[in-house]
Image: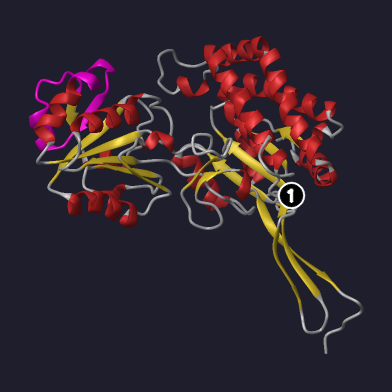
Amino acid sequence: MKSIEPILLRVQKATPGLRSATDDQIAGVLRALADLLESNGALILRANARDLKRQKPGDPRNDRLLLNEQRIRGIAGALRKVSGLPDPTGKELDRRTLANGLEVERITVPFGVVGAIYESRPNVTFDIAALCLRSRNGCVLKGSQEAADTNKAAIGLIRKALSENGLSPDCVALLPADRDTVQQLMKAVRLVDLLIPRGSEGLIRHVRSNSLVPVIETGAGVCHVYVEAEADLDMAAQIVVNAKVSRPGVCNAMDTLLVDREVAPVLLRRLEGQLGYHEVEVYADREALRLLKGYRLLQRAKPEDYDREFLSLKCAIRVVGGMEEALEHIRVHSTRHSEAIVSGNRDKCERFLREVDAAAVYANASTRFTDGEELGLGAEIGISTQKLHARGPFALEKLVTEKWVIRGTGQVRG
Protein backbone atom coordinates (compact mmCIF):
# COMPACT_ATOMS: atom_id res chain seq x y z
CA MET A 1 0.00 0.00 0.00
CA LYS A 2 1.54 3.28 -1.14
CA SER A 3 1.49 5.99 1.52
CA ILE A 4 -0.43 9.18 0.75
CA GLU A 5 1.48 11.07 3.46
CA PRO A 6 3.86 12.83 1.00
CA ILE A 7 0.85 14.22 -0.88
CA LEU A 8 -0.81 15.40 2.33
CA LEU A 9 2.41 17.03 3.52
CA ARG A 10 2.73 18.99 0.26
CA VAL A 11 -0.85 20.28 0.59
CA GLN A 12 -0.33 21.19 4.25
CA LYS A 13 2.86 23.08 3.38
CA ALA A 14 1.20 24.95 0.49
CA THR A 15 -2.01 25.90 2.32
CA PRO A 16 -0.68 28.89 4.35
CA GLY A 17 -0.06 30.64 1.05
CA LEU A 18 -3.83 30.82 0.57
CA ARG A 19 -4.22 32.76 3.81
CA SER A 20 -1.80 35.48 2.71
CA ALA A 21 -3.03 35.64 -0.90
CA THR A 22 -5.03 38.68 -1.99
CA ASP A 23 -8.74 38.34 -2.58
CA ASP A 24 -8.17 39.15 -6.25
CA GLN A 25 -5.73 36.25 -6.51
CA ILE A 26 -8.19 33.78 -5.02
CA ALA A 27 -11.08 34.99 -7.18
CA GLY A 28 -8.73 35.06 -10.17
CA VAL A 29 -7.95 31.35 -9.76
CA LEU A 30 -11.62 30.48 -10.05
CA ARG A 31 -12.26 32.75 -13.03
CA ALA A 32 -9.19 31.31 -14.75
CA LEU A 33 -10.40 27.79 -13.98
CA ALA A 34 -13.79 28.54 -15.53
CA ASP A 35 -12.06 29.80 -18.68
CA LEU A 36 -9.74 26.79 -18.80
CA LEU A 37 -12.65 24.40 -18.39
CA GLU A 38 -14.56 25.92 -21.29
CA SER A 39 -11.52 26.12 -23.57
CA ASN A 40 -10.51 22.54 -22.69
CA GLY A 41 -13.99 21.08 -22.79
CA ALA A 42 -13.04 18.54 -25.46
CA LEU A 43 -10.22 17.21 -23.26
CA ILE A 44 -12.59 16.77 -20.31
CA LEU A 45 -15.25 15.12 -22.47
CA ARG A 46 -12.74 12.63 -23.91
CA ALA A 47 -11.65 11.66 -20.40
CA ASN A 48 -15.27 11.37 -19.32
CA ALA A 49 -16.03 9.15 -22.32
CA ARG A 50 -13.28 6.76 -21.24
CA ASP A 51 -14.79 6.58 -17.77
CA LEU A 52 -18.29 5.97 -19.14
CA LYS A 53 -17.01 3.25 -21.47
CA ARG A 54 -15.96 1.20 -18.42
CA GLN A 55 -19.46 1.30 -16.90
CA LYS A 56 -22.39 -1.02 -17.44
CA PRO A 57 -24.50 0.31 -20.34
CA GLY A 58 -27.95 1.51 -19.34
CA ASP A 59 -27.14 1.84 -15.64
CA PRO A 60 -29.18 4.83 -14.34
CA ARG A 61 -26.20 5.82 -12.16
CA ASN A 62 -24.23 6.67 -15.29
CA ASP A 63 -26.12 9.96 -15.41
CA ARG A 64 -24.21 11.10 -12.31
CA LEU A 65 -20.93 10.41 -14.09
CA LEU A 66 -21.88 11.92 -17.43
CA LEU A 67 -20.49 15.26 -18.56
CA ASN A 68 -21.61 17.06 -21.71
CA GLU A 69 -21.21 20.55 -23.10
CA GLN A 70 -24.23 21.84 -21.20
CA ARG A 71 -22.97 20.49 -17.89
CA ILE A 72 -19.50 21.87 -18.51
CA ARG A 73 -21.01 25.31 -19.10
CA GLY A 74 -22.96 24.86 -15.86
CA ILE A 75 -19.81 24.00 -13.90
CA ALA A 76 -17.98 26.99 -15.39
CA GLY A 77 -20.90 29.22 -14.44
CA ALA A 78 -20.84 27.91 -10.88
CA LEU A 79 -17.09 28.59 -10.66
CA ARG A 80 -17.65 32.20 -11.71
CA LYS A 81 -20.44 32.59 -9.17
CA VAL A 82 -18.20 31.29 -6.38
CA SER A 83 -15.43 33.66 -7.48
CA GLY A 84 -17.81 36.56 -6.94
CA LEU A 85 -18.92 35.51 -3.47
CA PRO A 86 -17.48 37.41 -0.49
CA ASP A 87 -14.50 35.93 1.33
CA PRO A 88 -15.93 34.13 4.39
CA THR A 89 -12.66 34.40 6.32
CA GLY A 90 -11.46 37.27 8.46
CA LYS A 91 -14.96 38.33 9.52
CA GLU A 92 -15.15 39.91 12.96
CA LEU A 93 -17.72 38.03 15.04
CA ASP A 94 -17.07 39.79 18.33
CA ARG A 95 -14.78 42.46 19.75
CA ARG A 96 -14.46 43.74 23.32
CA THR A 97 -11.99 45.26 25.76
CA LEU A 98 -11.83 43.54 29.13
CA ALA A 99 -11.49 45.32 32.48
CA ASN A 100 -7.79 44.39 32.56
CA GLY A 101 -7.19 46.11 29.23
CA LEU A 102 -6.97 42.97 27.05
CA GLU A 103 -8.45 43.49 23.61
CA VAL A 104 -10.35 40.36 22.60
CA GLU A 105 -11.51 39.64 19.06
CA ARG A 106 -13.22 36.56 17.58
CA ILE A 107 -12.83 36.07 13.80
CA THR A 108 -13.56 33.48 11.12
CA VAL A 109 -10.59 31.49 9.78
CA PRO A 110 -10.14 28.56 7.36
CA PHE A 111 -10.14 25.01 8.69
CA GLY A 112 -6.75 24.35 7.09
CA VAL A 113 -6.73 21.21 4.94
CA VAL A 114 -10.10 19.74 3.98
CA GLY A 115 -10.36 16.16 2.75
CA ALA A 116 -13.29 15.00 0.62
CA ILE A 117 -14.33 11.46 -0.27
CA TYR A 118 -16.96 11.23 -2.99
CA GLU A 119 -18.38 8.92 -5.62
CA SER A 120 -18.91 9.16 -9.37
CA ARG A 121 -19.87 12.82 -9.91
CA PRO A 122 -16.88 14.56 -11.58
CA ASN A 123 -18.48 18.01 -11.19
CA VAL A 124 -17.90 17.59 -7.46
CA THR A 125 -14.14 17.80 -8.08
CA PHE A 126 -14.56 21.35 -9.37
CA ASP A 127 -17.17 22.32 -6.78
CA ILE A 128 -15.17 21.22 -3.74
CA ALA A 129 -11.90 22.65 -5.02
CA ALA A 130 -13.57 25.99 -5.77
CA LEU A 131 -15.26 26.27 -2.38
CA CYS A 132 -12.12 25.27 -0.50
CA LEU A 133 -9.96 27.74 -2.40
CA ARG A 134 -12.48 30.58 -2.00
CA SER A 135 -12.47 29.95 1.76
CA ARG A 136 -8.65 29.69 1.75
CA ASN A 137 -8.56 25.99 2.62
CA GLY A 138 -6.24 23.51 1.01
CA CYS A 139 -7.99 20.35 -0.13
CA VAL A 140 -7.29 16.73 -0.88
CA LEU A 141 -9.80 14.97 -3.12
CA LYS A 142 -10.51 11.27 -3.15
CA GLY A 143 -12.86 10.52 -6.03
CA SER A 144 -14.13 7.15 -7.18
CA GLN A 145 -12.51 4.78 -9.63
CA GLU A 146 -15.52 5.25 -11.94
CA ALA A 147 -14.54 8.89 -12.57
CA ALA A 148 -10.75 8.42 -12.42
CA ASP A 149 -9.89 9.77 -15.88
CA THR A 150 -12.25 12.74 -15.64
CA ASN A 151 -10.92 13.68 -12.21
CA LYS A 152 -7.31 13.50 -13.41
CA ALA A 153 -8.11 15.86 -16.27
CA ALA A 154 -9.95 18.19 -13.89
CA ILE A 155 -7.13 18.36 -11.37
CA GLY A 156 -4.71 19.27 -14.14
CA LEU A 157 -6.81 22.33 -14.97
CA ILE A 158 -7.15 23.29 -11.30
CA ARG A 159 -3.39 23.14 -10.73
CA LYS A 160 -2.78 25.19 -13.88
CA ALA A 161 -5.22 27.90 -12.71
CA LEU A 162 -3.42 28.09 -9.35
CA SER A 163 0.00 28.42 -10.98
CA GLU A 164 -1.21 31.09 -13.41
CA ASN A 165 -2.32 33.21 -10.46
CA GLY A 166 0.88 32.93 -8.43
CA LEU A 167 -0.28 30.26 -5.98
CA SER A 168 1.16 26.82 -5.33
CA PRO A 169 -0.54 24.08 -7.37
CA ASP A 170 -0.12 21.87 -4.30
CA CYS A 171 -3.00 23.70 -2.58
CA VAL A 172 -5.23 21.06 -4.22
CA ALA A 173 -4.36 17.39 -4.70
CA LEU A 174 -6.12 14.37 -6.15
CA LEU A 175 -5.50 11.19 -4.15
CA PRO A 176 -5.38 7.68 -5.64
CA ALA A 177 -8.85 6.28 -6.30
CA ASP A 178 -8.29 2.93 -4.57
CA ARG A 179 -9.99 1.93 -1.32
CA ASP A 180 -6.77 1.92 0.72
CA THR A 181 -6.64 5.69 0.32
CA VAL A 182 -9.82 6.07 2.39
CA GLN A 183 -8.33 4.10 5.28
CA GLN A 184 -5.22 6.29 5.31
CA LEU A 185 -7.17 9.51 4.97
CA MET A 186 -9.35 8.68 7.97
CA LYS A 187 -6.23 8.34 10.12
CA ALA A 188 -4.37 11.47 8.90
CA VAL A 189 -5.09 13.38 12.11
CA ARG A 190 -2.25 15.91 12.02
CA LEU A 191 -2.35 16.43 8.28
CA VAL A 192 -6.08 16.81 7.53
CA ASP A 193 -8.31 19.07 9.62
CA LEU A 194 -11.75 18.05 8.35
CA LEU A 195 -13.09 15.12 6.37
CA ILE A 196 -16.28 15.29 4.28
CA PRO A 197 -17.77 12.10 2.83
CA ARG A 198 -20.25 12.52 -0.01
CA GLY A 199 -21.89 9.49 -1.59
CA SER A 200 -23.79 6.37 -0.66
CA GLU A 201 -25.19 5.72 2.78
CA GLY A 202 -22.67 2.89 3.16
CA LEU A 203 -19.71 5.18 2.44
CA ILE A 204 -20.95 7.86 4.84
CA ARG A 205 -21.63 5.34 7.61
CA HIS A 206 -18.17 3.79 7.17
CA VAL A 207 -16.38 7.15 7.39
CA ARG A 208 -18.49 8.34 10.32
CA SER A 209 -17.77 5.13 12.26
CA ASN A 210 -14.06 4.83 11.52
CA SER A 211 -12.53 8.28 11.00
CA LEU A 212 -10.13 9.75 13.54
CA VAL A 213 -10.31 13.03 11.60
CA PRO A 214 -13.37 15.19 12.45
CA VAL A 215 -16.23 14.51 10.01
CA ILE A 216 -19.07 16.55 8.58
CA GLU A 217 -21.26 14.13 6.71
CA THR A 218 -23.36 14.89 3.67
CA GLY A 219 -26.24 12.49 4.05
CA ALA A 220 -28.21 10.23 1.79
CA GLY A 221 -31.70 11.40 0.91
CA VAL A 222 -34.88 9.40 1.38
CA CYS A 223 -37.13 12.27 0.31
CA HIS A 224 -40.92 12.47 0.52
CA VAL A 225 -43.61 14.48 -1.20
CA TYR A 226 -46.91 14.53 0.70
CA VAL A 227 -49.97 15.51 -1.33
CA GLU A 228 -52.53 16.71 1.20
CA ALA A 229 -56.32 16.61 0.68
CA GLU A 230 -56.59 20.33 -0.17
CA ALA A 231 -53.84 20.28 -2.78
CA ASP A 232 -54.20 21.68 -6.28
CA LEU A 233 -53.86 18.34 -8.06
CA ASP A 234 -52.45 19.78 -11.28
CA MET A 235 -49.72 21.45 -9.23
CA ALA A 236 -49.22 18.29 -7.21
CA ALA A 237 -48.74 16.12 -10.30
CA GLN A 238 -46.24 18.58 -11.75
CA ILE A 239 -44.23 18.69 -8.49
CA VAL A 240 -44.25 14.90 -8.06
CA VAL A 241 -43.07 14.22 -11.61
CA ASN A 242 -40.36 16.87 -11.42
CA ALA A 243 -39.14 15.61 -8.04
CA LYS A 244 -38.86 12.06 -9.37
CA VAL A 245 -37.76 12.23 -13.00
CA SER A 246 -35.81 15.46 -13.60
CA ARG A 247 -32.63 13.81 -12.28
CA PRO A 248 -33.49 10.54 -10.52
CA GLY A 249 -29.88 9.73 -9.61
CA VAL A 250 -29.39 12.62 -7.18
CA CYS A 251 -29.99 12.85 -3.44
CA ASN A 252 -32.81 15.42 -3.60
CA ALA A 253 -35.02 13.33 -5.88
CA MET A 254 -38.31 12.07 -4.45
CA ASP A 255 -38.24 8.48 -3.20
CA THR A 256 -41.70 8.14 -1.63
CA LEU A 257 -45.00 9.76 -2.55
CA LEU A 258 -47.52 10.04 0.29
CA VAL A 259 -51.00 10.86 -0.94
CA ASP A 260 -54.12 11.62 1.10
CA ARG A 261 -56.85 9.01 0.71
CA GLU A 262 -59.37 11.70 -0.22
CA VAL A 263 -57.53 12.69 -3.41
CA ALA A 264 -55.62 9.48 -4.14
CA PRO A 265 -57.97 8.11 -6.87
CA VAL A 266 -57.82 11.31 -8.94
CA LEU A 267 -54.13 12.09 -8.39
CA LEU A 268 -52.88 8.57 -9.09
CA ARG A 269 -54.97 8.44 -12.25
CA ARG A 270 -53.27 11.66 -13.41
CA LEU A 271 -49.83 10.42 -12.47
CA GLU A 272 -50.21 7.04 -14.11
CA GLY A 273 -49.61 8.30 -17.65
CA GLN A 274 -46.83 10.70 -16.70
CA LEU A 275 -44.89 8.20 -14.59
CA GLY A 276 -45.49 5.56 -17.24
CA TYR A 277 -44.11 7.85 -19.94
CA HIS A 278 -40.87 8.12 -17.99
CA GLU A 279 -40.97 4.38 -17.17
CA VAL A 280 -40.95 4.89 -13.42
CA GLU A 281 -41.15 1.62 -11.52
CA VAL A 282 -43.65 1.93 -8.66
CA TYR A 283 -43.65 0.09 -5.33
CA ALA A 284 -47.17 0.59 -3.95
CA ASP A 285 -48.98 -0.20 -0.72
CA ARG A 286 -52.20 -2.25 -0.84
CA GLU A 287 -54.47 0.75 -1.49
CA ALA A 288 -52.26 2.38 -4.11
CA LEU A 289 -51.80 -1.01 -5.74
CA ARG A 290 -55.58 -1.27 -6.19
CA LEU A 291 -55.87 2.28 -7.56
CA LEU A 292 -52.97 1.78 -10.00
CA LYS A 293 -54.18 -1.62 -11.18
CA GLY A 294 -53.08 -1.98 -14.78
CA TYR A 295 -50.00 0.21 -14.43
CA ARG A 296 -47.30 -1.67 -16.32
CA LEU A 297 -44.38 -1.15 -13.90
CA LEU A 298 -46.16 -1.88 -10.64
CA GLN A 299 -45.39 -4.15 -7.72
CA ARG A 300 -46.34 -4.49 -4.07
CA ALA A 301 -44.15 -2.49 -1.70
CA LYS A 302 -42.25 -4.29 1.02
CA PRO A 303 -41.64 -2.49 4.34
CA GLU A 304 -37.98 -1.90 3.47
CA ASP A 305 -38.94 -0.11 0.24
CA TYR A 306 -39.98 2.91 2.32
CA ASP A 307 -36.40 3.22 3.59
CA ARG A 308 -34.77 3.12 0.16
CA GLU A 309 -32.94 5.92 -1.57
CA PHE A 310 -33.66 4.65 -5.07
CA LEU A 311 -31.33 6.93 -7.10
CA SER A 312 -33.12 5.67 -10.22
CA LEU A 313 -36.49 5.76 -11.96
CA LYS A 314 -38.20 4.00 -9.07
CA CYS A 315 -40.40 5.28 -6.26
CA ALA A 316 -42.64 4.05 -3.46
CA ILE A 317 -46.23 5.19 -3.02
CA ARG A 318 -48.36 5.04 0.13
CA VAL A 319 -51.93 6.23 0.66
CA VAL A 320 -52.38 7.91 4.06
CA GLY A 321 -55.44 8.84 6.07
CA GLY A 322 -54.44 12.44 6.73
CA MET A 323 -51.68 14.69 7.92
CA GLU A 324 -51.00 12.87 11.19
CA GLU A 325 -50.28 9.63 9.35
CA ALA A 326 -48.10 11.43 6.80
CA LEU A 327 -46.07 13.16 9.50
CA GLU A 328 -45.58 9.89 11.36
CA HIS A 329 -44.43 8.10 8.20
CA ILE A 330 -41.90 10.85 7.51
CA ARG A 331 -40.71 10.80 11.13
CA VAL A 332 -40.01 7.06 10.91
CA HIS A 333 -38.55 6.82 7.40
CA SER A 334 -36.96 10.20 6.63
CA THR A 335 -33.19 10.65 6.48
CA ARG A 336 -33.83 14.34 7.30
CA HIS A 337 -32.72 15.57 3.90
CA SER A 338 -35.62 17.14 1.95
CA GLU A 339 -39.37 16.85 2.60
CA ALA A 340 -42.29 18.52 0.82
CA ILE A 341 -46.01 19.10 1.27
CA VAL A 342 -48.41 20.11 -1.49
CA SER A 343 -51.52 21.77 -0.07
CA GLY A 344 -53.74 24.77 -0.53
CA ASN A 345 -54.24 25.03 3.23
CA ARG A 346 -51.75 27.58 4.56
CA ASP A 347 -52.07 26.44 8.19
CA LYS A 348 -51.29 22.84 7.26
CA CYS A 349 -48.33 23.94 5.17
CA GLU A 350 -46.95 25.98 8.05
CA ARG A 351 -47.45 23.09 10.47
CA PHE A 352 -45.54 20.77 8.11
CA LEU A 353 -42.69 23.28 7.75
CA ARG A 354 -42.56 23.72 11.52
CA GLU A 355 -42.79 20.09 12.64
CA VAL A 356 -40.88 18.09 10.01
CA ASP A 357 -37.26 17.59 11.08
CA ALA A 358 -35.19 17.86 7.91
CA ALA A 359 -32.41 19.98 6.47
CA ALA A 360 -34.81 21.42 3.87
CA VAL A 361 -38.61 21.53 4.03
CA TYR A 362 -40.88 22.70 1.22
CA ALA A 363 -44.45 23.85 0.77
CA ASN A 364 -45.77 23.60 -2.80
CA ALA A 365 -42.37 23.14 -4.47
CA SER A 366 -40.19 20.29 -5.67
CA THR A 367 -37.51 18.80 -3.42
CA ARG A 368 -35.11 19.20 -6.35
CA PHE A 369 -34.24 22.73 -5.20
CA THR A 370 -32.11 21.44 -2.31
CA ASP A 371 -28.91 22.47 -4.01
CA GLY A 372 -26.33 25.11 -3.21
CA GLU A 373 -26.43 26.79 -6.61
CA GLU A 374 -30.24 26.76 -6.78
CA LEU A 375 -30.45 28.38 -3.34
CA GLY A 376 -28.02 31.15 -4.25
CA LEU A 377 -24.85 29.76 -2.67
CA GLY A 378 -22.88 29.35 -5.90
CA ALA A 379 -22.00 25.70 -5.34
CA GLU A 380 -21.95 23.15 -2.55
CA ILE A 381 -19.91 20.28 -1.21
CA GLY A 382 -23.06 18.33 -0.44
CA ILE A 383 -26.23 18.39 1.63
CA SER A 384 -25.51 17.98 5.33
CA THR A 385 -28.22 16.13 7.25
CA GLN A 386 -26.51 16.44 10.61
CA LYS A 387 -27.10 19.30 13.03
CA LEU A 388 -23.68 20.37 14.26
CA HIS A 389 -22.00 23.33 12.50
CA ALA A 390 -23.54 22.81 9.05
CA ARG A 391 -27.00 21.69 7.92
CA GLY A 392 -28.51 21.73 4.46
CA PRO A 393 -26.38 22.85 1.49
CA PHE A 394 -22.81 22.71 2.81
CA ALA A 395 -21.36 25.69 1.02
CA LEU A 396 -18.83 28.48 1.32
CA GLU A 397 -19.91 30.13 4.56
CA LYS A 398 -19.61 26.83 6.46
CA LEU A 399 -16.01 26.13 5.41
CA VAL A 400 -14.65 28.27 8.22
CA THR A 401 -14.10 27.93 11.94
CA GLU A 402 -13.31 30.54 14.61
CA LYS A 403 -10.19 31.96 16.19
CA TRP A 404 -9.84 34.08 19.34
CA VAL A 405 -7.28 36.87 18.96
CA ILE A 406 -6.15 38.56 22.20
CA ARG A 407 -3.92 41.65 22.25
CA GLY A 408 -2.29 42.81 25.45
CA THR A 409 0.17 45.25 26.92
CA GLY A 410 1.93 42.90 29.34
CA GLN A 411 -1.03 41.59 31.37
CA VAL A 412 -0.49 38.44 33.48
CA ARG A 413 -3.13 36.44 35.28
CA GLY A 414 -3.17 36.66 39.05
How far from the left and from the top, in percent, is residue 280? Answer: 27, 22
Q: Nearer the viewer, residue 245 or 152?
A: 245
Can see residue 339?
Answer: yes
Q: Residue furthest bottom?
A: 414
In percent of width and height, residue 213 lies at 64, 52
Q: Residue at x 43, y 41 (%)?
A: 220
Q: Is residue 13 above or below residue 247?
A: below
Quadrant where the C terminus sits is bottom right
**Quadrant placement of the N terminus:** top right
What residue range appears in magenta?
273-297
Which residue lies under the disc numbered 1? 112
**Above or below — where is 281 with respect to 192?**
above
Residue pictured at 27% horizontal, 37% vertical: 256
- Magenta highlight on residue 411: no
Q: Nearer the viewer, residue 163 or 26?
A: 26
Which residue is located at x 9 percent, y 41 percent? 262
Residue 114 occupies which quadrant of the picture? top right
89 sits to left or right of 13: left
The residue sitting at the right extreme is 410
Whole-percent x and y of residue 348? 23, 51
69 lies left or right of 339: right
The figure's colour scheme reads secondary structure
Q: Is residue 125 visible?
A: no
Q: Is residue 281 magenta?
A: yes
Q: Amino acid at mark 1?
A: Gly
Question: Which secondary structure lies at badge 1?
Answer: loop
